[in-house]
Each structure stands twice: as C-alpha cells, then as structure tokens.
Image (tube, helix red, strand yellow):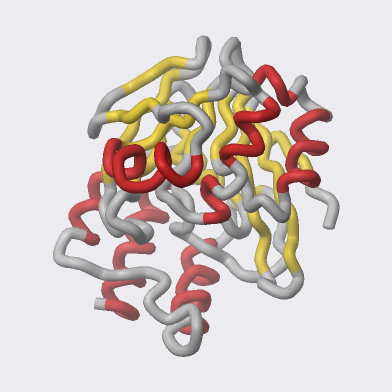
Amino acid sequence: MAARVTEIAENVYQISTFVERANFRFNQFLVLDEQPLLYHTGTNLLFPEVREAVATLLDPSTIRWIGFSHYEADECGALAAWQTLAPEAIAVCGLTSKMVSVDDAAALRPAQALADEETFSTGKYRFRFLRTPHVPHAWDAGHLFEETQGILFCSDLFHQNGDLEPLTNADVVGQFRQTLLDYLDGPMSGYFPHTNHTQEILQRLAGLQPALLAIMHGSAFVGNGAQAIFDLAAVMKEVLG
C-alpha cells in the first residue's frame, strides 16, 4: 500500500495510495513553497505511508499549512498526527469547520478560519477560499483555488473509481457519472447531495477557469477545467436532480 508521488504542476505533488477494498485512490497534495502546504491529511490508517512519501520531498516537520474541504476522515483525520510531527502546522479551513468540528475534535491547536473569498499566501503561491456548502458534501465544505497556476483543489468532485493514472486530460466526467450511478444504492447512497444551490456553486467554481483539477479520488485533470465543471454540473443534475 505504498504511496505514489507525482509532480502534477510546478512544486505541486500528488501523493496517492490505492486502497483495494475501496477500489479507489486517496490523494493528498503537497505544495512546496516558503511555507509548505499539505492539502488533505489522509486517514490515520494511511498516515505512515503518506508521511514517508512527504519525506521524499521535504522534512515533514516543516509543513506550515494543512488544508482540506470539510470535516471527514480522509480530509483531515490525521490532522493531529501531522501537527504533532510539524509543530508550526496550522489547519486552514472555513469558519464552520473550525467552530463545529476541527478545533474540538481534530486539531492540536486552533485552526485559522477563512471567510468566503479570503486569500492567503505560502510565499510564491496565493490561495483563495470559496465557501461551497454541500458541494461536494457536508455543510462546512469549501474549496481552495491556487491563483498563480490556476489549480482548483476540488475534494471529492470528479470522484473516479479504480487504480488510475496520476494525471489525465481524458474524460473524468464520464468516470464520475459512473461513480454516481454505482453509489445510488447501498452504503454509499447520498454521497453527493443535490440542493437548490448546487448548480450555482458549480457555476461559480467554473468561473475560476481552472487549468488543473486536483481531485481527491482518481486522476488529476489537466485541460479546460471550466468546461469539465460545467459538464459535471449537467451530470449531477441528470443523475441526482
């Protein structure tokens, strides 16, 4: 279950572990900069593999920021383990995550909450936070957009099952559609909600014109990110709406 490390953009590395019983990959993203950022911690179970992978790129104790979309095991389950390892690491998330879950249940030190459209810098790179309740899921959900290279860290959106390549310009929306259909029934039903605000939120994300989609499960997508998000919105409305 060793993690695979791939540079998917300048100074942005995908750390990916395939879990056979789940039949998909769990991806974290490490941004090398003056103040390194780890996006997604992975679960506590995956922490040893992810830590070893990070150590091939930098000293894990130097991580300064830990980001994630919402409170969930694969998003921030190993937050305390990472903060123990990196004594200056601060969680950065939406205010709802901070107040409702993260500060009490996950973090060793208070998280830095970001307001909608608030930005912060890690040095060379600049990140904007967008509040996206229930997209992909959970009322505390949000997304980070790296403005310098046009990278949208889009959590579970575009989820693709299988042991897939690190980076693709192929049809990730078609694979996402199949995932939705596979999860309509059974224990994964309700994985993606569709509310009155879903389409509006997805249109807002498409308006960022991302050049790269850093996806939690499956291949990262390089290409016309806006069109991919528009296509994803149509699929979600068709299957879930």
Q: Which quarter of the figure is the C terminus placed in?
A: bottom left
Going 22% across and 60% down the picture, which residue do you hit? 199
Give percent across and percent down for residue 116. 23, 34
> Residue 185, position in %: x, y?
45, 89
Q: Look at the picture and state if 71 lies above or below 173.
A: above
**Quadrant in which the N terminus appears:** bottom right
On the image, the x and y values in percent for residue 202 come to: 28, 53
Image coordinates for residue 216, horizontal then vertical, percent: 56, 52
- Name the residue: 67% across, 60% down: 25
Residue sitting at 41 percent across and 49 percent down? 70
Please tell me which residue is depicted at 62% across the width and 20% down the height of the picture. 87
Query: Is residue 96 toward the left or the right of residue 11 in the image?
Result: left
Across the whole image, how many numbered discs are drawn on residues? 0
User: Of 44 and 144, which appears nearest the observer?
Assistant: 44
- Whether residue 202 is visible to the viewer of this picture, yes or no, is no
Left or right: where 61 falls relative to 172: right
Reply above or below: 48 against 182.
Answer: above
Q: In this view, does 108 lie above or below 231?
A: above
The quadrant where residue 129 appears:
top left
